[in-house]
Image (cartoon, rainbow, N blue to C red):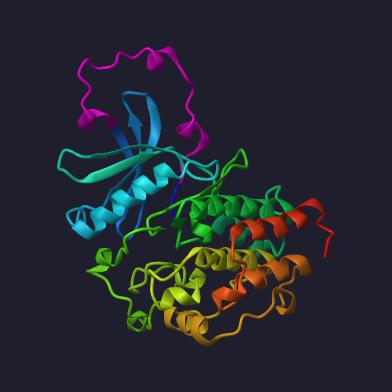
């Protein structure tokens, strides 16, 4: 799990030694970043904190893993991720600072260094306590988090981008209650089809390992998104999805928040995929959870996770409108 930096590291005390530090007369980008510390290692990338010696601040640095850095398909995806992240300028997306190449020619990009708790960590805390009232939070505050994620998705959809990997691990809640939707590495951008990016992969989900037990990871399965939050149509074609696929994934998170149990049942990747193909989602109000479930929120949830995309909400702004009816009056059912 990613280890986000503490407040002191992310926001150090401002001193004259830093603000008045001389800028090199001939700045060299290859010497700009120092004091690297690994935050997380993913399937293809390494995320680190480091110090920007020009602006004298600690930032986030992302690069491809050394063993994958020369792969042209992954390089193209990586550069796309950097530019999508930079172009989606919204309060609930992370600011991007620079896209460049290291001394060995490999691409990297830098972003604002954020810290806080992922929505996965929050859900786990709530599930352990069998209550939404954990660490000063409440169901209303947590629904507001998902509302902000919805606003980020609506903004992205209006600008021609589908996230394709909406999940609790990609939602960060900071100490100032800021909410960020992270990791646009699988984003679909309208325009030329991106099937050429998948020359080294396969859509044959059946080859997923039967021994894979963690349905939140896909390192052993040839899937792009995370099975427990994938829309059924993502099993057919990763390129055939539209914004309604993100709405499905968002609804799966809402379901988990309401019931404190994962919506998609199954302990292995193959069982999860089988549920996506043939299983029937049980209404949140009908699933024993130990916590009360709002009928209004449950109806929103079920309208998001319909198997047929045509039966779902067709736009994220409609979801937000109905969600905010409840936020204005939590007794509304």
Q: Is 233 situated left or right of 61 in this image?
A: right
Q: Is 27 situated left or right of 128 in this image?
A: left
- Say if 43 sits above or below 35 in the image: below
Residue positioned most to the left: 104
Q: Residue at x 20, y 26 (%)?
A: 28
Residue positioned most to the bottom: 278
Count all numbered tags in the image, as a single digit.
Answer: 0
Q: Residue at x 42, y 12 (%)?
A: 16
- Residue 4 is situated, as x and y percent measured from the top left of the image, at 46, 45
Q: Residue at x 30, y 56 (%)?
A: 77
- Residue 215 is situated, as x and y percent measured from the top left of the image, at 46, 72
> Is residue 138 visible to the viewer in this orientation of the structure?
no
- Say if 30 sits above or below 48 in the image: above
> Is residue 153 visible to the viewer in this orientation of the structure?
yes
In reply to whether residue 110 is colored magenta, the answer given is no
- Residue 301 is situated, as x and y percent measured from the top left of the image, at 66, 68
Looking at the figure, which quarter contains the N terminus? bottom left
Q: Where are the magenta residues, as a range?
A: 4-33
Q: Quadrant of residue 303?
A: bottom right
Q: Nearer the viewer, residue 67 or 196?
A: 196
Q: Nearer the viewer, residue 251 or 211?
A: 251
Q: Residue at x 64, y 53 (%)?
A: 147
Q: Is 307 situated left or right of 4 in this image?
A: right
Looking at the figure, which quarter contains the C terminus? bottom right
In reply to whether residue 28 is colored magenta, the answer given is yes
Q: Quadrant of residue 92?
A: top right
- Residue 102 is situated, as x and y percent measured from the top left of the image, at 20, 39
- Say if 93 sits above or below 164 in the image: above
Q: Quadrant of residue 325?
A: bottom right
Q: Magenta region's main secondary structure?
A: loop
- Say if 209 sits above or below 328 in the image: below
């Amino acid at each position: 799990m990613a280890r986000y930096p503490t407040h002191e590291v992310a926001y150090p005390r401002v001193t004259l030694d830093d603000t008045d530090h001389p800028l090199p007369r001939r700045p060299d980008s290859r010497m700009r970043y120092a004091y690297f510390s690994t935050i997380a290692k993913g399937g293809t990338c390494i995320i680190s904190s480091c110090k920007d010696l020009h602006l004298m601040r600690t930032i986030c640095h992302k690069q491809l893993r050394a063993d994958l850095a020369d792969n042209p398909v992954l390089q193209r995806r990586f550069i796309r991720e950097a530019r999508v992240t930079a172009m989606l300028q919204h309060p609930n997306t992370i600011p991007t600072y620079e896209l460049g190449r290291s001394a060995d020619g490999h691409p990297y990009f830098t972003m604002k260094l954020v810290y806080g708790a992922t929505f996965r960590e929050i859900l786990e805390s709530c599930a352990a306590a069998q209550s939404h009232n954990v660490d000063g939070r409440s169901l209303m505050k947590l629904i507001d988090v998902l509302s902000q994620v919805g606003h980020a998705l609506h903004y992205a959809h209006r600008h021609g981008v589908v996230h394709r990997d909406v999940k609790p691990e990609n939602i960060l809640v900071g100490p100032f209650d800021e909410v960020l939707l992270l990791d646009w590495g699988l984003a679909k951008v309208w325009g030329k089809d991106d099937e050429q990016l998948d020359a080294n992969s396969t859509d044959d989900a059946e080859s997923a390992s039967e021994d894979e037990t963690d349905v939140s990871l896909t390192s052993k399965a040839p899937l792009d998104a995370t099975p427990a939050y994938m829309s059924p149509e993502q099993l057919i074609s990763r390129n055939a999805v539209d914004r309604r696929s993100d709405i499905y994934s968002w609804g799966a998170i809402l379901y988990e928040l309401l019931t404190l149990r994962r919506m998609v049942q199954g302990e292995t990747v193959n069982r999860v995929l089988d549920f996506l193909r043939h299983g029937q989602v049980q209404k949140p109000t009908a699933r024993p959870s130990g916590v009360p479930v709002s009928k209004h929120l449950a109806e929103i949830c079920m309208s998001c996770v319909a198997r047929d995309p045509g039966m779902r909400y067709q736009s994220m702004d409609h979801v937000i409108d109905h969600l905010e009816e409840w936020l204005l009056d939590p007794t509304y059912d």
